Structures are given as C-alpha cells and as structure tokens.
Image (cartoon, rainbow, N blue to C red):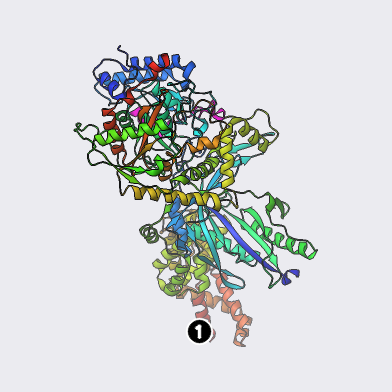
Amino acid sequence: MKDFAFATVAELSAALAARQCSALELTDAALAKIAAAQPTLNAFVSVDPDGARAAAKAADAARAKGEGGALTGIPIAQKDLFMTEGLRTTCSSKMLANFVAPYDAHIVTALKQAGTVLIGKTAMDEFAMGSSTETSFFGIVHNPWQPEAVPGGSSGGSAVAVAAGLVPAATGSDTGGSIRQPASFCGITGIKPTYGICSRYGMVAFASSLDQAGPMARSAEDCALLLTAMAGHDVRDATSLPHPKEDYSRELAQPAAAKPLEGVRIGLPDAFFGDGIDAPVLAAVEAALVELRALGAATVPVSLPNIDYSVPTYYVLAPAEASSNLSRFDGVRYGHRAAQYTDLFDMYQKTRAEGFGDEVKRRILVGTYVLSHGYYDAYYLKAQKVRRLIADDYQAAFAQCDVILGPTVPTTAPSLGAQMQDPIQMYLNDIFTIGANLAGLPAMSVPCGFTPNGLPIGMQLQGPYFSEARLLNIAHRFQQATDWHRRTPKETRHA
Amino acid sequence: MRERTWEVVIGLETHAQLSTASKMFSGASTAFGAAPNTQASAVDLALPGVLPVANVGAVERAIRFGLAVGATINPTSIFARKNYFYPDLPKGYQISQFEVPVVQGGGLTITTSTGQKTVRLTRAHLEEDAGKSLHEDFHGMTGIDLNRAGTPLLEIVTEPDMASAEEAIVYAKALHALVCWIDICDGNMQEGSFRCDANVSVRRPGEPLGTRCEIKNLNSFRFMEKAIEFEVRRQIELIEDGGRVVQETRLFDPDTGETRAMRSKEDAHDYRYFPDPDLPPLMIGADWIARVARDMPELPTAMAARFIADYALPAYDAEQLTASLAFARYFETAANIVGKANAKTVANWMIGELSAALNRHEISVENAPISPEQLAALIARVQDGTVSNKGGKDVFEALWQSGARDDVSAIDRIIAERGLQQISDTGALEKMVDDVLAQNPAIVAEVRAGKEKAFNSLVGQIMKASRGKANPAQVNALLKKKLG
C-alpha cells in the first residue's frame, strides 16, 4: 500500500473506490501510527483495534459488493464525550475513567451508518472545560507542530490526531470554541454547525444551550463530507432542528471559476481586528483577505457592538448550565464513588471532590453561585439578555454581509502550562469564538498561515443560520487557492 | 370549643399522576408494580448524554385539566430545573415548571355542610416524579427503585381558600372526581396516583395570615382529615400556650394520628431553578386547545344541570348521579330506555339499591354485574306490575349473583324461576281478601270503627297470605271496596 499519511478523506475515499487500498489497510496503518505517536502526543484515551478492524472488514465487504458511500472505510476518531457502545467514554475525567456506555450517541450511529471506521476516542479538557486539553485526567496532550505548545481545547486530542496524520478526520464538540480553537492551533479545518443541526443525544452535556458537535479534518471538503453524515433531525433531542437533510458538499462540486467568490460579501467586524491580536495572526488573516478578494469576494466593515460582553456572558451561562448538568455524577449509579464515607452527603462530597478536577470544580462553583437565590437576576437573567443582544447584533450584521471573518483566536498556541495559572487570561482568548455559540450560528476555522516559529494560524468564518454549505464553499475555494491546510508537522518535528 | 376564636387557613398542593402509557420525558412504561428498575430507561437513569423529550400526551392532559377548571392555558410555558441532590433523583434535578406553568388560575366549586364555595386555583404545572428509596430490605444500605422516576405529574396548587378540614376534604374529593372524570389520572390513591400536601395555618379573625406548616404526602382522605385536624389543634395549643409556629415541613403518622417535624425552613434547599436548556419552551396554540376542548367529556356540573332540566331530577339526585362519569353514563343509558318520565325511578334505584350493592362489594360501577340495560328492564317489570317493588329488589339481588350482565332476558327468567310475579288476577285476589275478612271479624269491626292501623293489619295479612306476591295497590283498592 502506498503511504496515505496526511491524505484527505476525499483522497482516501477515491483510493478506496479505486481499490488502491483497503479499509483494513488504512485502519491498521492508523492503529500503528497511533501506537507510535501515543508516547509523544497522547492524543488518544482509548483505542479499539478489534472493533476498528471488524468495522474495516465490514466496510471492505460493502465496497466489494458495490455498496457504501464516500465515507465507507474511512478511519475516524471520536472525541471522548460521545457515547460509544461497549467502548469507554471518559470525558477525560476520573469521574468516568471506567465508564462504558450501553449506547451510541446519535452522531456516532450516524457516522457508523455512513461506513466510517471508529478507531478510538480522543483526549479532551475534562468535561470539555478548558482551552488547552491540559485539564484532562489522562495527561497532557502535545501539539504536533511544537511539542512544548498546547494543542488547544477542549477538542485537543481530535485536533492532534488529525494534524499529526493519525486519522484523516475526527469529531469535536464546540461550546465556546472547542472545535475552532484547537483546529486553529493545530492547523486543521473544523466547523461548528448551527445549534440544533447535529443531535446532542449521547454527547455529554457541558452547557446544553451552547454545545454543538462538528467535524475536524484536513480540509473544508472533508468537513463537508462528515457533516453531511452527522447532521439530521433526531426526535430524542428536543433542541434538534427539524431541518431537512442537506448535502454540504453540493456547492463544492461546482467547477471552479476564475473568481469563484464573485458576489460574496465578507463582513469584517472592527472588534475582530482590534488590540490584543498577535501581529503574525493579524498579518496572516489580512493576507488571507487579499487572497479572498482575489477570488472575487468583497469586504465590508460591520459592527458587533456587544461582542465585548460575550466572554462574561458566556462565563455566567456556561457554568450555570454545567453546574446542573454535572449533578448526575454523584457516585450513586455509575462512575467514580469514594471508597470510604460516613453517610450520604459525605459520599457525595468525597466522590465529587475526588472525581472532578480543579477547572470543573471552579465552573461548578461559579455556576452554582450565579443560579443561587438572590443572584439569579443579577447574573443568569442579565446574561440571557446580553446573549439576546449579541444574537441581534449578528442578525443586523448579516443584513450587510454574507459571512463574517476574523482570526479564530487572538494568538497561536501558547506553551504548555502558560495558562493554567491564569484562568481569566485563558477565558479571554475565547473572545472571537464565543459569539457564534451564544447566537447559535455556524462558524469554522480555516488554516491561513504560520508564525515565524512554525505555529499554525487559523481564520474564522461565521455565517447566518444554516449557512454551512456556503461557509464550507468559501473555505474550499480558499483552500483550492492556498496550501496552508496541506502543510504537515512532520518536517517540523523531525527538523 | 377553643377553635371558635380561631380561623383556619388551608391551601392544598395535589400531585395527580397523569395516565400516560410512557413517562414525562422518556419512552419507558409507567405501569405500576413492576420489578424494581425494570421500567427505567437510559433517560430515567440519567446516563451521561441522554436528553428529555416532553410527552405530548401529558401536555394534552394538562390542557384538559385547565379547560375543566376554567383556567388560562399559557400559550408558552417553560420547563425548569429544580436542583437538589438525592439518590432517587438521578439527574440531580427535577424537571418541573417554575415561573411560567402550563395552567394558570381557574377554580373548583365545592358543596360543604355550610353551602357552596369556589376554591381558587393558583396554577397547575407539569413535572416528573422522583424514584423511590427503599430503606427496609437492605441492612445499613438504601435501595433505589427508579421505575417511578420520570412519571408525569400535574401539580395542582390552590389559593389558601379552605377554612376547615371538612372543606379541604370536600375539595380534594371533588378534585379527585374531576381528574378521574376527564380521564387524566386513574385516581388510585393506594398506588400514589393522587396525593396531597396541605399548607395549614391559624389566625385570630382579622389578623394577617399565620405561619404555615406543610404536611406532606397525604394519600387518603381520612388521613388528610386527621392530619389537618391534628395540625390545627397543635398550632392553636402552641400559640395559646405562648409559643410560636415555626414554618416547617411535617409528616403525618397514621399510627399515632399526629404530625411531626420533617425539616424546618432553615434546612430548605436553594433549588436554583432555571429554564431547562434541553427543552424548548412548551408552545400550545389555540388550535391545539380547540382540539382538546372538542374531545372533552361533558363536565359533571354541566351534566348535573342537564339532568335536572331534562329528566326533572332533584338537585341532590343529579349531584349523586354525576359522582363519576361512569355512574352518570349508567344513569343516562338506563333512563333513555325506560323513558324520561321514569328517570326518577332509575335515579332512586341507582342511588339506593345499586350504590349500596357497589359499596357492599367494593366495586366500581364499571364492574357492576348488572348492566344499565338490565336495570332498565327490571324497572319496566316493576312499573308494569309484573313484580312488586319488593320483588324487584329480589330480582336485583338474584341478577347481581347471576353475573349475566349482558342478558336482559335474565330478568323475566329470574321472575319466573323464583315465582316472583305479583298476583294481579282479580279473582284470585278477591278470594284471598274474602278469606282474610272472614277469618278476622274483630279487625274488620275495628276498621269500620275508623281505625287506620286495623286496615293496615288486614293488608299485611293478605300480603302474607299471598306470600308477598299480591299487588299491594290492588289489595288496597279491593279492601276499600269491600269495607267501604
């Protein structure tokens, strides 16, 4: 078999269709690469060689019969907060370190039905709370571009698995940027769809009104393929939208014109280009704008007047929901339970003190506080009102433009440990990503350059509700004209 | 009667378990009595990643209730999380409704010994039940049964409008009858399908409301009456002895007939209510309400009024007949067979004979071994003189025993088999009358002297001679003719 390392899903799909390789070969290659990389990168919490090989053989059998689709036989990884039947789901927490779910999450089922081969589960910030994957109970995860840098988070393991070429695609979840920020830090492409597009059934809830699943891959084209499989109405999730099934690749297939983005109006909010952005990041995004204009797009200034309040708003609402969502981890029915306790409340206290890490505890405390009697109106209710204002800002902006663009994160990946001492600084770095979660809008991160030190830079595209196909198409046309997304850390790491 | 100088103020919160096949937010069955934890789905166990979906049937039942009590059905209501830790509460929160309930306002009119009164309803909201903690069977441990977890409940809250235990019981019984009537709750109190919490306070007339105590989980009307009466006495004695009522939650102990403190206000949880982000606002459009209204059964008060108008029944009879929908339907079926003119006779039979038999055998009218068609046929036989009233009661008893519910011909068969026909043959009767007169010259003389009692004695003797089969009206007429 030819070396398919760093091949895209689309390329592997073509190779499988052309019998240039088998799903089993791709799976074995992925398992070998993961085993080799695990000591240095630590991207995976669990790997399922037997299950993966069985699924790969089934995929090969299906393809041999002329059945299956574009994703049949493609190895993927799942972020370890999606329930996988028979394969443990830990949320990178001691609390669930040995938890094996009796069912598959909706998107896990959807991706299995599409023929993908589940290789394993990727590390994350504990219960998706964090921006560096450093809060994982299973140890630090390293950025393949620079081992002393964080991979971002909370979907850090998935970002590393794709960036290091261990699997061609993985899933993530995004509550305040948890797909886009690690995608940006690791030089890959990731999309958080419109809230309600992907069912949350079987995805461990962090902040229910903000959480969305989405794909992380090497290209917009690959993200479109995965999202097409993952999206769809699910009656088990009352917030799942009864939106008709879409083919998110449909605009990508159209032949490339000289100016494929003719007529596209890109809105540039002043808030996304202000102070506090690293110079290389700003330069890379501005260079990308030059490229996008060359492809035919026009840029217009827009305004998001309340976006500065998005971080405090988010850090009231998300912990509030989390404090309640995480109450079920009480040691009674499953998960960690303290070994010694004197009575029921001692059991609760010890179980949760032992089972949760510091960042999770911090957010439970904040969330409990803002929902408490006498504080609810001042914090939770006020934050809900600001959330509405931010959503209204976006609606007003989209009256003037088709998409909004800016850096995904003001910085590139910080060094390991740099942010753990200063949670406020860590929270502030979510400034550009949180707005899309608060408003429920689709948003994606697309590689657009590197720092002089070789760390990836990502730009973010945000669009109106249900504009995924358009966002993916803009990113795809950009990627047809650039090669940032095709760079690999291999050379860097061996240099 | 120290109570005379005190006013009692009572408000009730009732949990009516809604009669849906599946749970409030999951597809698991709600059937009672299954082996522990066999009716608990992944959602009920609160496994990681599961989500609630509201049961449309439960919402529909809430709408039905709202319509029945003349309440406002909120076009948008909100499910909220009530957060607290307890082993039989798997999610660590109960999904309920807090600021905006599905049903708001309305009232229920009750009739007590002191007259009619309307108890105002504050609200009724949808929520899920918790599981059960089992302390008995496990030494030093607690067993958890989550079969009940997630069962849909409608919590119906009154204003503090009841002024005595009697009023509270009458209200609770009326509410019980109503939720059964509109078929939203099976009303089974032993199984906990209908249970009340009573908020009780006392005050001297003219004073502001006193401090209240809440008595939890009263699952029988008798216990409720005893608990409230005890609590009223306790509070009055406490205050009169110079003490102060402390706001607290109390439990009624049926063994001692007393209430005892469970937890004080200071121990009360901060439930940190907030809108459940897993559930969108509950939207109820006018078309949905109209659809539910169209399928609503006629309500008991409307039906009683109609019985009074259509069947010329006294108000008491109409009220008794509308005690349950099944009883009322039984009446209408029988009354329509015997004809409106004889409807009062049907009412008499049902309020008398039938009710007594149902009570004696402790069964509901749906399970009565005598069908309304049979009762109508029986009444027809009394009316046409085939059997006497007394004979009719014998037929009723025999019919009850036979259990041949659908067999209308059973009535004539029983009459024939048991020889219960009245003797209406004038010749045969005349002979009996003549014999009795001849055998009792002294009594005949007394009758002629104007003694009413003596006349009745002769009737009795003739009835006895006929072994009860003589038609008493005919006997009377004959006697009068002969002695006149």
Of residues B184 and A146, the one drawn nearer to the viewer in this rendering: A146
Q: Point out residue B204 in the picture as x, y percentages from the top left corner.
A: 71, 70
Q: Secondary structure at mark 1?
A: helix
Q: Is residue B96 visible?
A: no
Q: Please state which amino acid type lies under the numbered disc 1.
A: Lys
Q: Which residues are magenta?
A: A90-113
| Nearest the eye: A361 or B193 | A361
| Mark 1 Cα shell of 10 Å, populated few (<14), some (14-19), many (≥20) | few
Q: Quadrant of the C terminus of chain A?
A: top left
Is residue B39 positioned above or below A27 on the image?
below
Q: Is residue B52 above or below residue B281?
A: above
Q: In front here: B336 or B286? A: B286
Name the residue rendered at 46%, 73% in the picture: B308
Q: Is B291 on the left-hand or right-hand side of A97?
A: left
Q: How many numbered circles does the render carry?
A: 1
Q: Can you give x and y, in whole percent of width and height, for residue B45 in the image?
A: 52, 37
Whether residue B112 appears in this view of the structure is yes
Task: Let me know if residue A378 is in the magenta part.
Answer: no
Q: Is residue B157 left or right of residue A198?
A: right
Q: Position of residue A158 (x, y in %)?
A: 42, 26
Answer left or right for B437 relative to B73.
right
Name the residue located 39 percent from the left edge and 51 percent from the top edge: A392
Residue A104 inside the magenta-drawn segment: yes
Q: Residue at label 1? A: B481
Q: Nearer the viewer, residue A96 or B179?
A: A96
Quadrant of the image containing the N terminus of chain A? top left
Q: Position of residue B429 (x, y in %)?
A: 49, 74
Q: Is residue A296 left or right of residue A161?
A: left
Rendered image quadrant of residue B342: bottom left
Q: Given the image, what chain letter belongs to the residue carrying mark 1? A: B
